[in-house]
Amino acid sequence: MTFHHSPEGNRGWSAGTLLARMAEDDRRGLLELSTPRVYSGGHELIRQGEPSGPVYLLLDALVTVTASVENGIETLIGIGVSGDIVGEMAVIDDCPRFASVTLCRKSLVGRIPGPAFMGYLQRHPSVPLVLGRILSDRLRHAHRRRLEFTGYDVDIRLARALLELARLHGRRQPEGLDIGVPLSQAELGALIGATEGSVQRALRQLAARSWVRTKHRGVLITNHEALTRFAELATEP
């Protein structure tokens, strides 16, 4: 597997991530602070409930962020991609990890000790502002998801989730727009608060209208405009 992270500029980082949003000098300093390491797919980078430790830069990686409640039910909170940072909240708050982070594939990750990261933030006062904006985006997204759980049926929630994943991580292909994240139907269900069976039925309905096409651990959006209208989202002029 070949890795494609780039320490200079932001070409190698997914839009909206920490490394993409940072000023070049700040980004270079953070990268120099990290120790890169290759991990295999399925490796649990962070475990929920553990004490705070290092933070991790996703240099060429894809992760799922999950959390379990008291009854043991696990929920997919979000996805992390190249350019994201994970584990920073526990270090900043000095609290136990609130979620688990698992690698979806073989990945290149930069490890930064917690104290070194805190010292870096003190020396680079513009970076906490960027982190604050990212946290605000996460909270806004979580709030929107809670509203969608009660305000929309599963098929619309699924359409919205697919469009959001494609916007953040999508890859254009001749047949359409790949959502760019290898998620199973069970994981998609966890992301939108629905059962795997409900997601299967919704995907069949969307595919029957030729708006999406399913594949192994993935979805291809074949009619972006129609899916956007169905999701009751504003289309670009």
Image: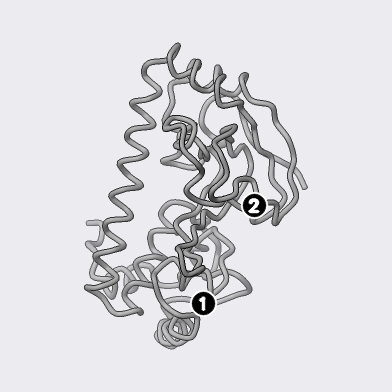
Farthest-out residue, front: 70
Q: Position of residue 88 (x, y in %)?
A: 48, 34
Q: CA distance from mark 1 to mark 2?
A: 25 Å
Q: Is residue 38 left or right of residue 178?
A: right
Residue 64 figure quarter: bottom right
| SS for callout 2 | strand
Q: What number is the disc on residue 213? A: 1
Q: At label 2, which amino acid type do we have? A: Leu
Q: Position of residue 94 (x, y in %)?
A: 46, 32
Between 17 and 91, which is closer to the camera in this rendering?
A: 91
Neighbours of disc 1 within 10 Å: few (<14), some (14-19), many (20+):
many
Q: At label 1, which amino acid type do we have? A: Arg
Residue marked by disc 2 = 103
Q: Residue at x 35, y 79 (%)?
A: 155
Q: Residue at x 60, y 70 (%)?
A: 217
Is residue 205 depicted above or below 43 in this figure? Answer: below
Q: Position of residue 102 (x, y in %)?
A: 62, 53
Q: Residue at x 36, y 19 (%)?
A: 126
Q: Position of residue 215 (x, y in %)?
A: 60, 75
Residue 227 figure quarter: bottom left
Between 153 and 52, which is closer to the camera in this rendering?
A: 52
